[in-house]
Every structure is written in C-alpha cells, then in structure tokens.
Amino acid sequence: MPNSSLLLEIRNLHVGFRIFEGHLRVLAGVALVVNEGERVGLVGETGCGKTTTVKSVLRVLPIPPARVAGGEILYRGRDVLRMHRHALHVLRRQELTAIFQDPLQSLNPVFTVGSQLRDIVRDSMRTPEGRALSRREIEARCIQALEETGMPDPDRIMSNYPIQLSGGMRQRVCIAEALSTTARLLLADEPTTNLDVTIQDQILRKLDRLVDQKGSSVLMITHSMGVVRDLTQRIYIMYAGSIVETGPTRQLLASPKHPYTQGLMASVPRLTGRGVSEGIPGRIPNYLEPPPGCRFHPRCPHRMPECSVEAPPMFDVGADQRAACYLYRRSSS
Ligand SMILES: Nc1ncnc2c1ncn2[C@@H]1O[C@H](COP(=O)(O)OP(=O)(O)OP(=O)(O)O)[C@@H](O)[C@H]1O
Ligand code: SF4
Ligand SMILES: [Mg+2]
C-alpha cells in the first residue's frame, strides 16, 4: 500500500560516469527516503556522491558522461527517471527547488536575475485573499527576497545577468528563489558555501523557518555537523556511493554504529579539507575500480573475511537506526 507521507524515495540508485580512463562506478545502490514535512540530512566526506544524488533527483546530470545504470527515484510515487519532458518541467517548476554548491548550475545565463526571480514569484505567490500579485507587488517581493539573503543593492542586481555576479551573489539569488517558491521539497546542496561565515547561520535559520511555515520538506547536504544536528530530524551517512547508516539525527550522532560513521564523528567539526583522515586512515576509493564487497573495507579497523565478498545490507542497530555493516548481522530482525 502506498505510504501517503512518503514524498521522495530513492531506490537502489546506480550512477556512473564515462571518462577517458574508463567507467567511474560512483553511486552503488543509494536508497533514501524523505517524508512530507521532514528535514533530512545527507552527510559524507568529499567525493562520496552527495551532489550526484541530488542532481539525479532533478535529472540535471550531464548524460553523457553520466549514466544511470539502475534504480528508481519516486517522487510522490512517480518515477522521475521515467518522466517525460513536460512532467519533468512541471515537477521542477512547482514541486522541487534546489540550491546548489555551484549556483551557475541552476541559474539561466541568458536571463537577468530579475526576470528569473519574477517568474518564480508570479507562479508561486498569492495575496492573503488568494489573488495573483500585481506587477508592483511582484517587484517588491523580489527585492525583499534578495534583501533577506543580505544581497547588497538588490535593485541593481535585478537587472544583472548571473555571469555579472560573484559566486556568493549568485548563491544569494538561488536562496532568494528558494525563499520565494511554494515547492514541497527543497534540495539544499551546501546552500551557504559561497557566503560569508557571518551570514551562513542566519540564512540557514531563515530557510528553516520558511520551510517550517510552508510545511515543506528538506534534503540538506552539509559538511557541518552543527547544521545537521540543529536543522534535521533524520540523517543519512554516505560513503563512496552508498548509504552506510541512517537514523534519527541526534540519536545517530550520539551513538554512531557504522565504523565509518564512528570515524567521521572523530573528525568533526568539518569534513572538508583533509577529509576524515584524522578519524580514519586512508581515503575514499578510486571509482574506476571500487573495492568489492563493503566499499569501506580497505579502511575499516573491524573488517572480516566476508566484508570483501559481498556488500552488506542494512541491519537494525537501534530504534529506527540501521547500518550497512556485518558487525550487526545477528541483531537484525
Ligand atoms: N561530470 C562528471 N564527470 C566525471 N566524474 C564526475 C562528474 N560529476 C561527478 N563526478 C565524480 O563523482 C564522484 C562524486 O562526486 P560528487 O560531486 O557527487 O561528490 P560530493 O559528495 O558532492 O562531494 P563534495 O562534498 O566535494 O561536494 C567524484 O569522484 C566526482 O569526481
Ligand atoms: S561490513 Fe565489514 S568492512 Fe564494512 S564497515 Fe562493517 S566491519 Fe567494516
Ligand atoms: Mg557536492
């Protein structure tokens, strides 16, 4: 029976990239769920496939070199991977909104900031009485949305093209768009990386309040454990192209069970830069020839002979907490 609270469900997603040297097998059976009104975090060290996952949901991966080798991405029960162009357009226009690490990904280079923002406000906002906004109201709402992101001189920015803006300004435009839509699901991929540290927290909290007011859902990718702890209810830990652990955020952070998550916790607060090397020796594997079985086995202090034979399924490790690790085989129900 379909679960009415299920908004997004990614099932067994496999995505690779064809490069000169061969085939990168990046996503290896990603599975995750976002329910209606839920805030979900996706965490993992650099290169583990978080952006590839989000781009797969939006169907914005460049094909080629990317290739979706298998799996399903169900949005309210419909497979995004099999949607036709029109349905996909409606989905991106009305249901999903994304803030990318690299904002040039989601801004159209041939239209001014104002023209893109006005379209979104016109399509998604109504007065309290339910009528469409007038041109003047649309303009005022666009300026206000830009101001809310701390954008300097929003009037002038409205007539600029994305290429004329700095990375931080472009990210602010994407955030202003996200603040203006009525989308049900916000895909936030490191939404504040290009902003000053002083404003990052403020913007994240603003996004969070807005999402709360609208009852929308969020899939939040971040390197900051503080952000996931404060702003998400459930968390997925990703390693080398698959989900290795999931559970209620605070519970999982307080009691991580997968050896990778345990290493990750030892390398907080930031996972950027030197990665998790302080917590776990070694690096993320080469996707041209990923290790067989559990992809974490070359780095795992607890590896056993079977770990390099077959990838472990998820085992129950606590209330609503699951880990893909053979150490927990007996505790599975
Ligand atoms: N267009 C592409 N062509 C070839 N390889 C790619 C492409 N896009 C991503 N990859 C590879 O896929 C892997 C995962 O990349 P992805 O951007 O999804 O990681 P990430 O988890 O988002 O990392 P970060 O935290 O640094 O943003 C990397 O090894 C990357 O080099
Ligand atoms: S399955 Fe084996 S190698 Fe993988 S994390 Fe668990 S113990 Fe380590
Ligand atoms: Mg990324």
Image (tube, grey):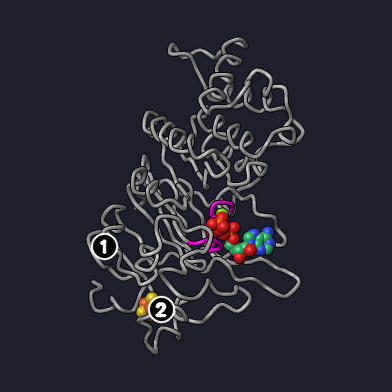
Disc 2 residue: CB within 8 Å of ligand 2? yes
Q: Which three-letter amino acid code belongs to the residue tagged 2? A: Cys
Q: Mark 2 points at which residue?
A: 300
Local crowd size for mark 1, using a 10 Å CA cut-off: few (<14), some (14–19), many (≥20):
some
Residue at x-position 22% and y-position 60%? 319
Residue at x-position 60% and y-position 73%? 287
Examine the rendered structure and indicate whether residue 138 appears above or below residue 330. Answer: above
Query: Mark 2 or 1 closer to N-term?
Result: 1
Q: Mark 1 points at which residue?
A: 255
Judged from the image, the secondary structure of the residue bearing numbered disc 2 is loop
Q: Which three-letter amino acid code belongs to the residue tagged 1? A: Ser
Residue at x-position 37% and y-position 46%? 35
Residue 60 % position (x, y):
64, 50
The stretch in magenta equals 45-55
Q: Splitting the image into 4 quarters, where does residue 114 fall?
A: top right
Residue 171 % position (x, y):
59, 37
Local crowd size for mark 2, using a 10 Å CA cut-off: few (<14), some (14–19), many (≥20):
some
